[in-house]
Every structure is written in C-alpha cells, then in structure tokens.
Image (cartoon, grey):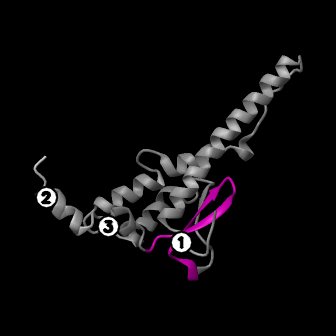
Amino acid sequence: ESFATNSLEQLCINLANERLQSHFTRITFEAGKADALAEGVTVQASDYSSVDPTPTLDLLLAKSTGVLAMIVEECHIPKGSDASLLEKLKDTHLKKSKRFDVPKDPKQRGLFIVHHYAGPVSYAVEGLLVKNRDPLPEDAVVVLAGSST
C-alpha cells in the first residue's frame, strides 16, 4: 500500500505484506514444482528472483544495517534526528541495494524509497523517530509506579 504520505505505520504494514508475499511465493513455487515432478514432468531450476521479496526483507530486517534496526539505533543516540537517520540510510543502502532509493526531485529531500514486491513506496522521515520512541502515556506511568506487584 502507498499513500500520499507514508511513515512508520505504513512501513510496518508493508513489511507484513512483504513477509506474507515471501511465504506465498515460496509455497506456490514449491507446490508447482512438486506437482510437476509427481506428474513426471522434468522441472528445470526456475529463477523467480523478479518476484522474490527476500532482498526487500533483508533491506528492512537485517540485524544492524536494516532500516528498522537503524531507526531503533537512531532513537538511542542522544542527538539522533530524522535528518541524520536519512543520511545514515543513504550512506548504508544507496547504490548498494537495488531495493532502496531516494527521490530525484530536490523538493522531496525528506523521503526515502523502498522497492517493495508490489512497487516502490516513498516514506517520509519527518516524525519517524518520535513515532518509534512512542513513550508511555503519563497516566500509565503513574499507575505502574503505584503498583505493588
């Protein structure tokens, strides 16, 4: 899915869709191959890299260099900012991953693009770290602090 403005929530939704697509693709190709073999049809190794979402999942989920890991890391840096996150994402992924890009239009400087299975989606970095920090509401803190168990 892609909207006029996409942020952390949409990134998480698209990640879930990407994982579902990965599962579906793997199952579909394995089942098709098994059916063909059961019918005695010789099956050549097929290249389904054009529909394989693994590179996008790696881009998003890699332990220290994945987009999500970098968002979490930037939240822990005292002077971490949306702008510094974008620069780190570009330094890490631009020209190294076919699934990561930035808009060519200089008016869209605060965006990065992830090439998902369903197509490219632009994500705004503005406010992304605040959303990821998501502090507990003050009343929940008070209730938890007053709890004896």
State the image coordinates of residue 137 (x, y, percent, origin top left): 27, 67
| CB within 8 Å, label 3 to label 2 | no
Task: Name which of mark 1 and mark 2 comes first in the sequence.
Answer: 1
Identify which amino acid the numbered label 1 is placed on: Leu
Q: Quadrant of the N terminus?
A: bottom right
Q: Is residue 66 above or below residue 4?
A: above
State the image coordinates of residue 64 (x, y, percent, origin top left): 40, 47
Q: On the picture, is 64 further left or further right than 139?
A: right
At horizontal 83% and vertical 26% (from top left) the residue drawn is 44
Query: 69 or 149: nearer the eye?
Result: 149
Q: Secondary structure at mark 2?
A: helix
Residue 111: mark: 1
Task: Give the residues in magenta.
Answer: 107-126
Q: Residues within 10 Å of mark 1 (few under 14, many from 20)?
A: many
Residue 117 part of the magenta-drawn span: yes
Q: State how far apart marks 1 and 2 are (Cα).
A: 39 Å
Q: Which residue is mark 2?
A: 145
State the image coordinates of residue 98 (x, y, percent, origin top left): 63, 54
Give the dominant element type of the magenta stretch: helix, strand or loop: strand
Q: Give the number of the mark in front: 3 or 2.
A: 2
